[in-house]
Amino acid sequence: MFRRRARVQAAGSRQDEAPAAVRAQARPQRIMGVKRYNHPIVGRITLTYHTLALAEGPEQTLYVYTTEPGSPSAEGLRLLAKWIEEGNIPPVR
């Protein structure tokens, strides 16, 4: 009788965990999209992002941001990187 009760209690605890796992998976996750920033020096920057969940753990996520090659956003980021590298950041307009 004691073993049966222990098995029933163990099965009940697994059932309690299942809805939480299902709820965690059911949460909508945005895996790609567009972010727009209005930078005070270079102006509007539009970035496309992709979200990659890492296999090492659900709490680890890698975000990759890109710009359209040759776009004003790409040029703005290139200028910012150059100014930072040179230590010559212009004043905010």
Image: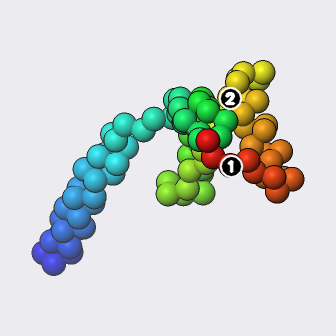
Are there few (<14), some (14-19), or many (20+) residues within 10 Å of tag 2?
Answer: many
Residue 11 in view: no
Residue at 59% across / 30% down in the picture?
Answer: 44
> Looking at numbered disc 1 in the image, what kind of residue is underneath it?
Pro
Residue situated in front as seen by the camera: 74 or 57:
74
Above or below residue 68? Residue 76 is: below
Residue 36, percent from left and from top: 53, 32
Question: Going by the image, does 29 lie left or right of 70?
Answer: left
In the rendered view of the protein, which quadrant contains the N terminus?
bottom left
The label on residue 73 is: 2
Residue situated in front as seen by the camera: 34 or 14:
34
Residue 15, percent from left and from top: 23, 56
> Looking at numbered disc 2 in the image, what kind of residue is underneath it?
Ser
Q: How many marks?
A: 2
Task: Check the image and name the residue furthest to the right.
Answer: 86
Residue situated in front as seen by the camera: 78 or 25:
78
Picture quadrant of residue 16 = bottom left
The label on residue 91 is: 1
Are there few (<14), some (14-19), or many (20+) residues within 10 Å of tag 1?
Answer: few
- Determine whether the residue tagged by mark 1 lies in a helix, strand or loop: loop
